[in-house]
Image (cartoon, rainbow, N blue to C red):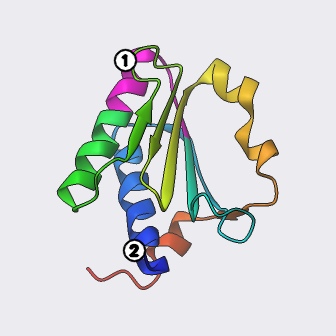
Amino acid sequence: MSDMTSKKMARIAYDALEEKKAEDIRVLSIEKVSVIADYFLIASGTNRNQVQALAENVEEALYKAGFEVRQKEGVQSANWILMDYGDIIVHIFDRENRLFYDLERIWVDGEAISIDALREGEKE
């Protein structure tokens, strides 16, 4: 897929997370450091129900835009839900597991992207 497609997917996922009040949403561009995806989105929920609601909202928003999740893990425990869309991977954590796994540190070579940068060139 093109960079514009992965950027659009990341933007849709970001908006879906924001809509359900996700905490500390981060977008990392990892395309220069890994072949697994172009973007990681990392967010937190305050409890199990919110983490699940965040994942459901992301999945619904991306599905409506024509993107289907390839693989989804962690939905039952809801302490870390991983949603693989190929070009983007969405990680939704509870607070404790986000601190424990600290993906931002592990993927420190990835470039932090602002929502404004994701929205660049967006057609309204």
Residue plotted at (48% across, 62% down): 87
Q: Quadrant of residue 42?
A: top right
User: Is the N terminus in the top left, top right, bottom left or bottom right quadrant?
Assistant: bottom left
Residue plotted at (37% across, 80% down): 122
**Mark 1 or mark 2, whichever is nearer to me:** 2
The part of the chain drawn in magenta is: 43-54
Residue picked out by circle 2: 5
Q: Amino acid at mark 1?
A: Asn
Q: Residue furthest left?
A: 64
Q: Amino acid at mark 2?
A: Thr
- Do the numbered discs 1 and 2 sit on residues whose CB atoms are within 8 Å? no
**x and y percent of residue 103 in the render?**
71, 40
Q: Is residue 113 magenta?
A: no
Q: Quadrant of residue 2?
A: bottom left
Residue picked out by circle 1: 49
For the residue labelled by badge 2, is the local secondary structure a helix, a strand or a loop?
A: helix
